[in-house]
Each structure stands twice: as structure tokens, then as C-alpha cells.
Image (cartoon, rainbow, N blue to C red):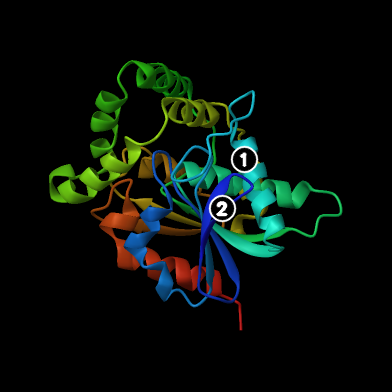
Amino acid sequence: MMLISNELNFKIVGRGYPVVFLHGFLESISMWDYIQIEKFPFQSILIDLPGHGKSLNEDDNEPSIDFMAEKVLGLLSKLEICIFSIVGHSMGGYVALEVKNKSLKAENSIIECQKVVLLNSNFWIDNDSKKNDRLRVAEIVFKNKELFLNTAIPNLFNEPTRYRNQISKLLNEALLLDEHAIAYSSLAMRNRKDLSSLVTSFDSDFLIIQGEEDSIVPKEVMEEFISNLNVEYCLLKNSGHMAHIQSSEFVRDVICDFILKGKV
């Protein structure tokens, strides 16, 4: 089933315990095709984030991950999904963190976000250099969107020449995105909150899947941040920022094992 509701496009696959899947920057729900979500023994709710895929480009006054999380929670409320886990790739991981954070802080809320999978994502704020990069993206995309995408997307792979077809597919999809949506998302990531305390306080609720050669989220930085935490950590060899493409079967199995752990 695929519908547009609450301005967000979504697709539901399977039945059972609900797990929400959020794609990354410049992506859409099509990214999950690589891990064959139909093989999961639970219900998968795939959501196009605002301005991505087939979701409407309705943005807030101030670009924020918080706004994206509110839209996701609004959709889940309409679907009457109260208890769930969530998987987020890259930017989708930032939104997943905020969904978890909001579910914990909401007064008298019946929403419970249980487990969180951060796939090629992280939980700390950008340093000054990265913030400047996000700002430049928001400026460059209005000048030459195609040039930006042709540079940015191949750089997500540690061996781009091996993934020409996948890169071509990503580029064709990203070229359909509105410049305002790309700029908004880049600035939203720049403005996001530091949710390190959330992960520290509820570390056993988290699985982090990390590409050994991920240049966007370097493993050395990740391992320093999680050194004293009880998160479940999976390091994928020969994989960059697009682990769902480069290590698709392994990613699917690890997510499945983590979500189902402790469930009858």
C-alpha cells in the first residue's frame, strides 16, 4: 500500500510489529529496495521525508529536523501506530533520534518509540567546518543543482566506479528534487540538536551500523563517541556511507536480529 497522507508519502509492507524506515538526504523510500524489506517478519512503514520522493515540499519557517520528526509522528498517529521501532539512514537517522526523543518527552503520550537503528548516521551535532559545508550546499544547489548532485552522490561510495548503475539511479531520482527542498534539508541538518544524552541514557535501545570506509561518518569518530556506551555496534568492512547498497544482505540481517531480539 502506498499513499500520500499528512503531506507525507508512505508505503506499508508486511504485517506484525511496526518498524518505521526513514531514508537519507537526497534519497527516498526506494533506497530500501536494496535490502528487500518484504523479507522482514514484521510490518515495515517506509516514509518519504518532506520534499523527498513523493512527499510534498511543505517546510517550516526555520529549517529543522524537529519539524520532520513532527510530520513523521503526525503520520503515525493517523495510522494509529502507537508502539514501534525506527530505522534511519544518514539524515533519516537524525529524524529517528528526534522521534525517539519526542516520544520520551511527550506528556501523557501513547506513542512509544522503542528501538532505534542508526544506519550510517550519528547522534552528535556538526562541528563548525561541517556546518559551513551545509550552508554552502544550501547556496550552491540554487546555482547549479546538477553539478552539486553529480559531485555529492558518487562521494557517498568508497568505490564509486563499482556502483555506476546505482549512482545513476540515485542521480536520476535526486534531480527531480526541488532546490528549496535540498537547501532546507541541508540547513535542517546543520541546525539539529545534540542528542548525545539521549543515546547515553537509553544506549541499549540503539543499534549503530557503520561503514568502515564511510567518509561522511568516520569510524574513528564514531568509535570514540560510543566507547563507553552499551549500544549494539556493527562495523561493515569494505563499505562506505551507502551500506544498504554495498552490504545489503548483512544490513537486512543485522536490523532484523536487533528488532526481534527479546520479542516472542
The circle on residue 136 is none
The circle on residue 229 is 2
Which residue is outermost to the bottom?
A: 264
Residue 37: x percent and y percent?
42, 68
Work out which quarter of the rendered image holds the C terminus and state it: bottom right
Mark 2 and mark 1 residues within 8 Å of each other at the beta carbon: no
Which residue is outermost to the left?
A: 161
Q: Residue at x 54, y 42 (%)?
A: 94
Q: Compared to 149, does 212 lie above or below? A: below
Residue density around tag 1, few if under 14, some if 14–19, many if 20 or more, within 10 Å? some
**Amino acid marked by disc 2:** Leu
Measured in 3D between alpha carbons, the distance from the residue under mark 2 to the one under mark 1, in whole angstroms, is 14 Å
Q: Is residue 28 left or right of residue 45?
A: left
Q: Mark 2 or 1 closer to N-term?
A: 1
Number of numbered discs overlaid on the protein picture: 2
**Amino acid marked by disc 1:** Leu
Given residues 117 and 6, the one toward you in this image is 6
Asked if one can make out residue 263 in the rendered structure from this viewpoint, the answer is yes
Asked if one can make out residue 236 in the rendered structure from this viewpoint, the answer is no
Q: Residue at x 23, y 54 (%)?
A: 238
> Of tags 2 and 1, which is closer to the observer?
1
Q: Secondary structure at mark 1?
A: loop
Q: Secondary structure at mark 2?
A: loop
Dividing the picture into quadrants, the one containing residue 249 is bottom left
Residue 107: x percent and y percent?
85, 49
Given residues 181 and 252, the one toward you in this image is 181
Dividing the picture into quadrants, the one containing residue 24 is top left
Residue annotated with mark 1 = 195
